Amino acid sequence: MLLLIYASSGYGRLYCVYVLVVGAVVSIFLGIFQKMQGPDSAYYIYEVTNRGGVVGFFANRNHLATLLLVTLPFVGALAVSPKRGSKHDHAKVGRLMITGCVALLIALGVVIVSSAAGWLLLPPAFFAAVAVFVRGEHGAIPRTLLQVGAVVGLVCCIAAVVAPIKVNDLGDKLSGIDPHMRNLSIRTTAAAALDYLPFGSGGGTFRLIYPLYEDANKASNEYMNHAHDEYVEIALEHGLPGVALLGAAIMFWFAQARRLWRRGEGEVLARAGCIGVGILLAHSLVDYPSRTAAMAAVGAFAAALMVAPESLEMPVWQSTRRRRRHGGARTIEIALAD
């Protein structure tokens, strides 16, 4: 996915965004059918899944919430006018109505999915989608929007850090998981990671190592295939080298985000991809979304957009520049003789 997006044309990247949005919307309706028919619904794709809930094409409702959240900033990008500042964009109202309805549908989908992490990340993701649209449409983000978005993000972070047990208990109850399993798995994995420093236990060994550190008196009948914190699992399996590589990736993301959001820099799809990667990084604090094939592909898509070079064939947002580069449209006049 990284190579495909990096080498694709501007229109190819835009078509991928359409596929992502359509896939997210279809997942919502599939999840609604699953919810309406109950735990025995024939619409559940996997045998082991959150039956009775909304999972769409996934086995875990939290990963569907991640997909919907990552899609939101791309919907904001699709709302941007093809020609920034044009006074004759007759399709603007219709485009805003369609993208606005899609954004509200996706936000409603996050709510009905009933993922606690999804609920906490929904307000920042929605404000980020608005910021993508405003930045692409007007070239700058009003200070008021930045302040409100910063406050909303700070409140959500405080809620996740100060009351993690309550929030996670709620999410676990909604997901049908024992209320203390998520927090217990994170603490147990962190303790094991300390014992396997500095080089870790090896990639893919979590399922072998975790039972050795699990308290038999507190263990449940549920199978723990991953820690519900991507960062501690990386620390366990890959030790200090893995932590260093992860830290370098996060620093690179911050550097790219700063460049893309600077005035006059970055394309609208690149900024949407930046937000998408940030959502994955945030959700990985309490889950493992990037270990599923679908979300790994979406994450690679968003990351590639952040660093992909400007294509010679640009999407509609660059239509004016593209025509100027190719010397304008060619016209042919035909005159009929008497």
Image (tube, grey):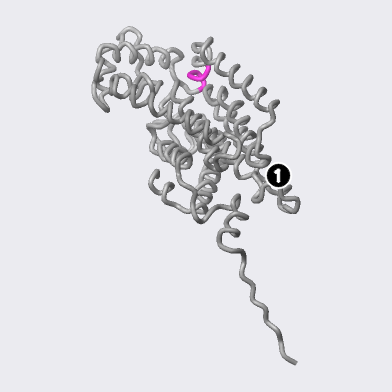
Residue at (54%, 33%) from the top-left corner?
69
Q: Position of residue 259 (x, y in %)?
A: 52, 34
Q: Tell me if residue 210 is in the magenta stretch.
A: no
- Image-based side of 336 in relation to 315, left or right: right
Residue at (42%, 13%) from the top-left corner?
183
Dominant SS of magenta comes to helix
The total of numbered circles placed on residues is: 1
Which image quarter: residue 121? top right
Q: Position of residue 58 (x, y in %)?
A: 45, 36
Q: Position of residue 175 (x, y in %)?
A: 48, 23
Which image quarter: residue 45? top left
- Image-based side of 10 in relation to 138, left or right: left
Which residue is at the front of the view, 127 or 296? 127
Q: Position of residue 252 (x, y in %)?
A: 43, 30
What residue does disc 1 label? Answer: 97
Q: Which range is magenta?
A: 170-174
Q: Tell me if residue 173 is in the magenta stretch.
A: yes
Which residue is at the front of the view, 245 or 202? 245
Q: Quadrant of the C terminus?
A: bottom right
In the rendered view, tell whether residue 306 sits above or below residue 142: below
Which image quarter: residue 180? top left
Disc 1 is placed on an element classified as helix
Q: Is residue 33 visible?
A: no
Which residue is at the front of the view, 328 or 133? 328
